[in-house]
Image: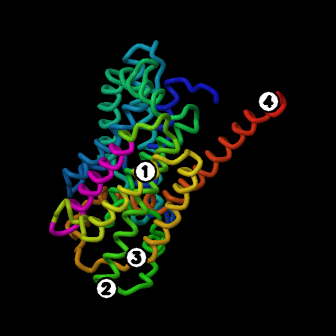
Amino acid sequence: MTRIAPASLPRTLALAYALLIAYACLHPLTGWQASGLPLFDYLIAPWPKYFILEDFVFNILGYLPFGFLAAAAMPATWPAWRGIALATLLAGLLSLGLETAQNLLPSRIASNLDLGGNILGGLLGALLGVRWGQAWFGARGFFHRWRAEWVIGGRTGEAGLILLGLWLLGQLSATDLLFSSGDLRSLLGIAAPLAFQPERFIAFDAALTAASILAVGLFARCMMRGRNPLPIVLLLALGIGAKSLATATFFEPGAPLAWLTPGAERGLVIGGALLTLTLLLPRLLQHALAGTALLVATALVNLMPENPYLAYNQRLAQYSNILNFHGLTELVDSLWPFVALAYLSALGLWRGEHLTARAGPARRGL
């Protein structure tokens, strides 16, 4: 496997993050039409009549990681001012392009205030990236050392890390189901095929939670070096934290443990036990079980009855950026298992070729 330069990871992450920003800003990506107004008139618009501080802060925070990653991807030999200037310029150009494109979407409003918040977020991120980027992503940085020790090398390892990051992002979606993903039914507006019954919901919830824990845990194991389960435990803990934050934000009352239903409790116990046992199996079997568990969990989430006892927080409707973020997490959550299955297939093919290449010389030596 070709060795990847340290700057490759922040560059890849910055590109992936830019694509996520683009989707969130242009969601729902339908109804494109010219408004009849000059595209850049919003740049000289006066201060808006209605100002929502939360939206402005969200615009700053949304571009801060991009500025950080862009600055961290700059050559270490560059002076600090050049990295800050270029990272901020990239953030500004990205925001300018997306804000201008919003003029063609009837459901969106281009705003110079949003553009200013995005540039400020990119600048703050760039300042942090110049200060801490090398410590995190440099040749001797934390992530480079951590990845060399724990994650398979090359682009394959980078793609796996990005997929795990997207899985965590998907856990911030507005659903009470722990670790669920692949819900095409909600994405396409299809009604639940089964009516809600308490016993049925608990059984589905337990099976879905167990299958999801097994799928995500083994997926992470397939891209890891060694047998230490600590990174898998940390990943699942982060997933629980993300889901707790989502349920506290999107549902009323804002209970962070709304996902901890009787079915989820059983699923955590069953899934944890199954994952512990399967981590003792050979890598080839773990790979096969990861794909099977992904398929099972995806089928279950699309058959799952709706939970009628959780009410969506309607006050969030006034915050456009919250709704855009919800659209982004819903898309990521719905498509993640299918991309993960493709990744596992490619990873299995690559490993099969390497095993064949190793076995060839051995057979010729007999």
Residue type at mark 3: give it: Met
SS type, badge 2: loop
Tell me the chief SS of the magenta region.
helix
For the residues labelled 1 and 4, say whether their Cβ atoms are less than 8 Å apart.
no
Is 352 situated above or below 80?
below
* Amino acid, disc 2: Gln
The residue shown at (41%, 32%) is 69
Colour setting? rainbow
Would you name the residue on which mark 1 appears? 217
Say if 131 sits above or below 330 in the image.
Answer: above
Region rendered in magenta: 232-253
* Residue 197: mark: 2
Q: Residue at x 46, y 12 (%)?
A: 77
Whether residues under marks 3 and 2 lie with C-beta atoms below 8 angstroms apart, the answer is: no
Q: Secondary structure at mark 4?
A: helix
Location of mark 4 (residue): 361
Where the C terminus falls, by quadrant?
top right
